[in-house]
Amino acid sequence: MLLNERAVVMAVQRGDAAAFRSLVERYEKPIYGFLYRLVGDPELARDLAQDAFLAAYCALPGLKGDVAFSPWLYKIALNCARQALRRRRLIAWLPWTAQHDVSSAPLDLSIEAQVVHQALACLPADLRIPLVLRLVEGFSYGELAAIIGISEAAVRMRVLRARRMFRTIYTAVEAESMGDIIESLASGGEQ
C-alpha cells in the first residue's frame, strides 16, 4: 500500500469521513469497471460498487496495517458480485447469450469493444475473474492469489488458460460480428 494511501486508511480508521470519500473517489471508476466486466449490467455494477464501498467502510476499522488496500477492496467487490449473482441464481456471470442484442450495449462502445465484451461473457467465471484482474486492473499474480483465495501457481494457470480460451472465442465472435456487418451492408442496411 502506498504510504499516502496508508495514511488515508488510518484516517478513515480514526473516523475521518472525508478521508473515506477520497478513497471512494480514487477507486470508484476502477471498481465499477471491474464489476461491470464481471456482471455485464451497468445498473447492477453501480449497485454492487456501492455495496462494496459500504462493506469496505464497515470493515476498515479491522484492516491490519500490512494488508494492501487495493487488493483488499477488489476482493470485497468480487465477493459482493458473487453474492448478488448467487442470490439471483444466475448460472452465467454475464447475461449475454447468443441472442443478446448488441444494440443494447452502451452507445460509446466500438464494435471491437463489443466483441471483447461478448468474448469475455463466454469465458467461465473462474477464468474471467483472474484475466480481468490481471490484464485490465493490473494486479500481480501474488495480489490475484490474495483476492481470489487460491495459490499463485493456480492463478498463473488460470490466466494462461483464460488467455488461450479468450483468443479462440474472440476470433469466433469477431468473425460472426464481421459476417453480420457484411450481411447488413449487402442488404442495404435494412433489417
Image (cartoon, helix red, strand yellow):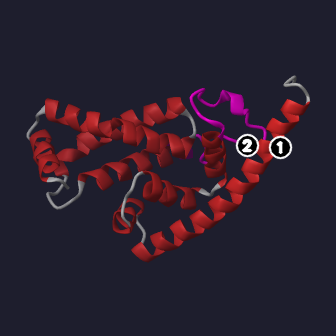
Residue 124 location, quadrant:
bottom right
Q: CA distance from mark 1 to mark 2?
A: 18 Å
Q: Earlier in the sequence, mark 1 or mark 2?
A: 2
Q: Kindly identify the residue that appears in the image at 19 percent across and 53 percent down.
A: 63
Relative image position of residue 129 (x, y in whole percent): 50, 56
Q: Give the percent coordinates (x, y) of residue 172.
A: 75, 54
Viewer-nearest residue: 73 or 2:
2
Q: Residues within 10 Å of mark 2 (few under 14, many from 20)?
A: few
Residue 13 position within the rendered picture, expressed as x and y whole percent measured from the top left: 12, 43
| Contact (Cβ within 8 Å) of mark 1 with mark 2 | no
Task: Write down the residue under mark 1.
Answer: 179
| Main secondary structure along the magenta-highlighted residues | loop
| Whether residue 177 is visible | yes
Q: Secondary structure at mark 1?
A: helix
Residue located 12% across and 53% down the image: 3
- Residue stretch rendered in magenta on the structure: 84-111
Left or right: where does residue 125 sit relative to residue 134? Answer: right
Inspect the magenta stretch and tell me whether residue 92 lies in it: yes
Q: At 42% from the left edge and 38% from the top edge, which residue is drawn?
A: 32
Q: Quadrant of residue 57?
A: top left
Percent x, y of residue 183: 87, 36
From what the image shows, is residue 173 above or below residue 168? above
Q: Is 61 rendered above or below residue 105?
A: below
Disc 1: CA contacts within 10 A as few (<14), some (14-19) or many (>=20): few
On the image, numbered disc 2 is attached to which residue?
97
Residue 144 in the magenta stretch? The answer is no
